Image (cartoon, grey):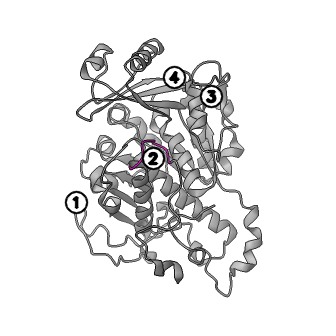
Amino acid sequence: MKFPGQRKIKHYFPVNAGNRFDRESVAFSHVNTYVTGIDQNLVDITARVDDELLAEFELQKGASQLMDSEKANLLYQRLQLNDAIEDEFAGGTIGNTLHNYSVIADDSSILLGVMSENIVIGTSAYRYLCNTSSKVDLTHLQPVPGAIGRCFALITSDGERTFGISPGQMNALGEDYISEAVIADASALLLCAYTLADESLPIYGATLKAAELAVKHDVPVVLTLGTRPLVEAKRETFTCFIRDYVTLVAMNEEEAEALTGHADPLLASESVLDMADLVLLTAGPEGLYLSGYGDQSMLRKTANPIRSGAVADFNAFEFSRPLRRRDCSEPVKVFAQIDPYMGGPDKIHNTNGAGDGALAAVVHDMTANHYHCTVLPTSSKHVKPFLTYSSFAQVCKYANRVSYQVLIQNSPRLTRGLPEREDSLEEAYWDS
């Protein structure tokens, strides 16, 4: 595993009298870390269209809506005829996150979902496989006789995105394909709100079973929220699920407002912390927020300027490391925020997947902590069962950097890892 951020090994394996790196290094090769996730496997199809086409196919502009297979086939044919398709990529928020995690961590992940049992070159299933990292284990997928899902991202001249989703067989994942061993040994379980939208679908039961197994084996559960309309429609369902199962909630500012009623990111994050232990909130031009709990006795004051917003002095303890609320003797809510990396890209090529990139970075830091605790359990880094290896502030930096990498490319999935040496780090750093 590559450790998160641009750090050298001495930062991760400190030498002290009771815990020497050279005594423990022999065990490194025996540590197998990975994360697991459940997704509605689909392919994202991006195309440039006009408002007339949206009206013809009865698609509400700016919204996300379901399409039956027949209408999806007709739309796809029209887009091909008009030469309007710009890209076709493997998609799905959890699929994106697992792929990105495997790229930046150089580590394994396991995807649970469905896949067409007969794959033909050029079909959606074929494109999905071609655009997924070889580090993502697909051997646990459930074979299905039909097609996987397709998500059309239709972009009009004003930049507005309209989404049309043709489910295919993407919701057919059954509980029999949820392995307890796969869940129990994972560093984290990643879930998305879309699989919880309809209790009548097989994937809903599969998601619930996976969450129950994760709680049973004390595996952190990560939940990403869907679009604002979905959160508004299923607010009570998601609230109960978060309270019962979830460790980390990931969302954007619109989803946060739909869930909590607060438009302010800090107030929304504070509200979600009454349900979960850690909150990642991406806020577009405002950057991102990471909020969670620290123990009063272990809080570390920031060296950065103190900032206030809807929460006074909210970043005062951003150099602390996150804990579950249950693991704090005196829990204190901690907030961190960071503006877009390098002020944001000069030109944004793609916003689809930027949040998934940020989440992959947070999950990477969580998994690195699990790995480090396994190989060096006596390290002073593990006097408490922290959720991440790094501080709130450092995880924000890393998540921000990965998100930026997605924004400057066309694909919602990373096509390569981060550079070995960042331009923003002076050469003296590497010589020390």
| Badge 4 or badge 3: first in the primary sequence | 3
The disc placed on residue 356 is 2
Mark 2–mark 1 CB contact (< 8 Å): no
| Horizontal side of residue 427 vs 288, given as left or right | right
| Horizontal side of residue 80 vs 171, given as left or right | left
- Percent coordinates x, y for residue 129 in the rendering: 61, 35
Q: Nearer the viewer, residue 430 or 375?
A: 430
| Horizontal side of residue 190 vs 235, given as left or right | right
The disc placed on residue 200 is 4
Amino acid under label 1?
A: Ala
Mark 2–mark 4 CB contact (< 8 Å): no
Mark 1–mark 4 CB contact (< 8 Å): no
Q: Mark 4 falls on what kind of element? A: loop
Magenta stretch in the rendered image: 408-414
Residue annotated with mark 3: 115
Q: How many marks?
A: 4
Amino acid under label 2?
A: Asp
Q: What's the distance in space between the residues labelled 4 and 3, CA to CA?
A: 20 Å
